[in-house]
Amino acid sequence: MNDKQFSIIKNGTVITPENEIKDGIVIIKNDKIVAVGKRGEIDEPQDAKIIDAGGNYISPGFIDIHINGANGADVSKIDSDTFDTMGSFFPQHGTTAYVGTTITAAPADILKALQFARTYLKKNKTGVAELLGIHMEGPYISPVQSGAHPKQFLALPKPEHYRQFLEYSDVLLKMTIAPELEGAAQLVKELRQRNIVVSAGHTNGIYSEMKEAIDAGVNHSTHFFCNMSHFRRDNLKRVAGVVETLLYDDRVSGALIGDGWHVGPQLMKLLIKVKGVDKVCFVTDAMPAVGLPDGIHKIGDVEAVVENGIARLKDNTAYAGSVTTMNVCVRNGINQVGLSVVDAVRMSSLTPAKIIGVANRKGSLESGKDADITIFDSELNIKKTVGRGEIMF
């Protein structure tokens, strides 16, 4: 950030997981936070570089755990510039860390993304948003609920198919599967043995089909309410579908696409009411066209039309991810759902950090954690973003 060891961010309202600290300050030493509190109540080191927050909010950096690409870069069609392009784009919108997401694709494309991520993580680049790992969304999903995922690459979770991906358990943080598929329960067990988050998504199951996989370790749900079954009849009896099963089971956290298009505010309020802000996070599910003009764009091998703030398939049968950013998700949480600034930020920082197991170093403004900080105004316009102690935007 500067030649001096210490920096102080002041003249703003600091957002903690529980409250707002008016006239708060954050003290940084190198790439770590060393103190957070109200100005005058904690010692300020002499000769520190001062970063003026301009009376705005001082927030933990946002963490997006479901993002397919940005500014033309596509995790499913990866090249040597993909993560640098994404990492340079995200800080403009307050995001300091992310999980790159592959959609259903040829196994070779998924393996390539995992290989590139492994190599990139070893470089430990600073000055860009931090890649935390990879999220595989598919290919083990339901053909009935596949949405924009190309059906020709869907597969059943058989060991001879999925174990090639498990060789990358050092970078594979999360996998979205349909728990009702034959063989899913065994895959869940093997993923959990490697501390990989197992997320139910693109699934058409009912409670009796879901229970075994949840007991085996399904602990998250991908873009809640989207591409998952609701209650229906089973031999005339009305039974819980995926939505009701996941709402009911406290072991499962949830992600909400906060673009304002995928899920209406009443449904978002329902999930938050049932599970609480500590178990529900915002994600963008953004596709590679975010940051680009409207037009025809691709996500993996799938063509999508981007216009009027949405990305959709050409036949208008499904969205193709979103073209939103995390600051917009936070803004929608406040304006559409009625969340406090504290809770909307928590759902975009500490909660996703907990879900993917990095809350020991990210997700909140606390001593000892990475100096990942974003400064925004009352309209969620990003003014400055700091990543691991360096000003990125």
Image (tube, rainbow, N blue to C red):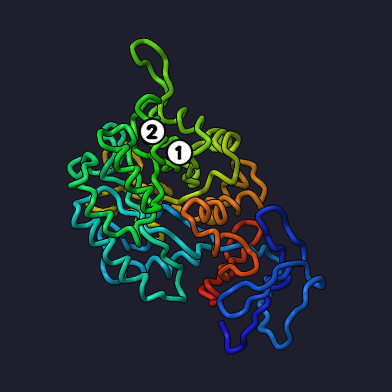
Q: Which residue is drawn at 32% across and 37% down?
A: 185
Dividing the picture into quadrants, the one containing residue 55 is bottom right
Between 150 and 110, the residue placed more toward the observer is 110
Image position of 268 (left or right of 46): left
Q: Mark 1 points at which residue?
A: 224
Q: Mark 2 points at which residue?
A: 228
Where does residue 197 sit, x and y in percent of width and height? 41, 49
**Dot 2: element:** loop
Q: Residue at x 66, y 77 (%)?
A: 51
Would you place residue 391 above or below residue 111 in this image? below
Where does residue 205 sit, x and y in percent of width and height? 35, 28
Question: On the rendered image, what quadrant is the N terminus found in?
Answer: bottom right
- The reply to whether residue 123 is visible in this rendering is yes
Where does residue 28 sit, x and y in percent of width and height? 63, 76
Q: How far is mark 2 from mark 1, CA to CA?
A: 8 Å
Dividing the picture into quadrants, the one containing residue 337 is top right
Q: Residues within 10 Å of mark 1 (few under 14, many from 20)?
A: many
- The reply to whether residue 325 is visible in this rendering is no
Kind of residue sitting beneath label 1: Phe
Q: Which residue is drawn at 28% across and 67% down?
A: 116
Where does residue 335 sit, x and y in percent of width and height? 62, 45
Image position of 23 (left or right of 195): right
Q: Which residue lies most toward the right here?
A: 40
Kind of residue sitting beneath label 2: Met
Would you place residue 19 above or below residue 84 in this image? above
* Labels 2 and 1 touching (C-beta < 8 A): yes
